[in-house]
């Protein structure tokens, strides 16, 4: 799949959704500085997207490729902050995700954002775990959604991450409460940690596919490294 580069590599994808959506707004961002591989006529055209997976992999800074699955829109985010295991990735127009050891704990600018989250450890691939999501409500109040989840390991499979094939261990996290249910899915490579995941951001955002763009030469710009001990889950209220 090809994508367009907007400053810090904001992506657009084929969609007729309104630009009021956080990801759709990426396709309407004003362009000042363009990559040599992108022409101005292609930047705003959803059906004329120009940067290939290979060009993303060759970009000199770590990138996160995020797809909002229910509307098929993409964004490329650059690493902008690291606070221990909490890493924030930001798009060209300041939409952002924060992940904790690769697990989504915060969104900004996507609509009805995930303000913060308490996330479990998923590496074991088995057992029952609890997660807590905090969302903005009316009158500037923060509401809590608590989910009971079950982890399962599906085995090893071949997967593709931004055009590069990997053998990965697949773990699912099936979650529910009285209001919502969802399944998160994680692809762990033995020598590269968490490479790809599908994680639920909330009822409005839906599920996001999060891919750590492999760098040219085969290494991956990843957050959850198998070489780094997993930190304890906790709640982050990040402003």
Image (tube, grey):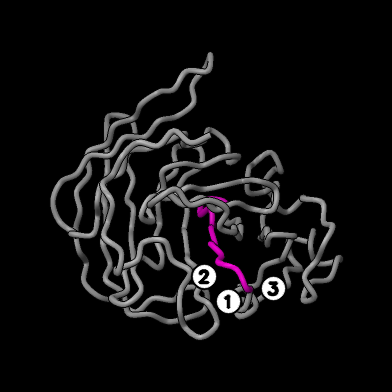
Which residue position holds label 2? 213
From the image, tell me which residue sits under label 1: 57
What is the spatial separation of the Cα atoms under label 2 and label 1, in whole angstroms? 6 Å
Check residue 99 in the rendering and tell me which mark sits there, or answer none: none
Of all residues, the one furthest to the bottom in this rendering is 217
Neighbours of disc 1 within 10 Å: few (<14), some (14-19), many (20+):
many
Left or right placement of residue 205 versus residue 157 in this view:
right
Q: Residues within 10 Å of mark 3 (few under 14, many from 20)?
A: many
- Pointer 3: what residue? 51
Q: Residue at x 77, y 50 (%)?
A: 28
The mark total stands at 3
Secondary structure of residue under mark 1: helix
- Is there CB contact under 8 Å for labels 2 and 1? yes
Left-right relation of 183 to 108: left
Residue 81 in picture, x, y percent from top left:
53, 51
Asked if residue 187 is positioned above or below residue 55 in the image, the reply reads above
Residue 148, percent across and down? Answer: 22, 38
- Measured from the top left, where is residue 34 in percent x and y? 80, 66
Mark 3 or 1 closer to N-term?
3
Range shown magenta = 60-71
- Which residue is rendered at x = 22% and y = 67% of the image? 154
In space, the residues marked 3 and 2 are separated at their CA atoms by: 13 Å
């Amino acid at each position: 799949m090809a994508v367009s580069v907007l400053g810090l590599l904001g992506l657009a994808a084929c969609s007729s959704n309104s630009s009021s959506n956080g990801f759709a707004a990426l396709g309407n961002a004003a362009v000042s500085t363009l990559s040599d591989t992108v022409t101005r006529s292609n930047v705003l055209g959803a059906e004329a997207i120009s940067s290939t997976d290979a060009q993303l992999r060759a970009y000199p800074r770590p990138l996160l490729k995020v797809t909002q699955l229910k509307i098929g829109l993409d964004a490329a985010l650059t690493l902008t902050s690291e606070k221990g295991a909490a890493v924030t990735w930001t798009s060209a127009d300041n939409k952002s995700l924060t992940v904790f050891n690769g697990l989504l704990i915060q969104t900004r600018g996507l609509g009805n954002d995930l303000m913060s989250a308490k996330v479990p450890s998923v590496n074991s691939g088995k057992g029952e775990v609890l997660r807590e999501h905090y969302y903005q409500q009316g009158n500037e109040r923060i509401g809590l959604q608590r989910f009971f989840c079950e982890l399962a390991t599906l085995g090893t499979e071949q997967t593709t991450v931004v055009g590069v094939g990997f053998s990965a261990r697949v773990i699912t996290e099936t979650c529910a409460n009285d209001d919502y249910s969802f399944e998160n899915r994680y692809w762990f490579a033995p020598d590269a940690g968490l490479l790809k995941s599908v994680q639920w951001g909330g009822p409005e955002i839906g599920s996001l596919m999060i891919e750590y763009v492999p760098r040219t030469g085969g290494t991956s710009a990843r957050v959850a490294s198998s070489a780094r001990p997993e930190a304890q889950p906790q709640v982050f209220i990040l402003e």
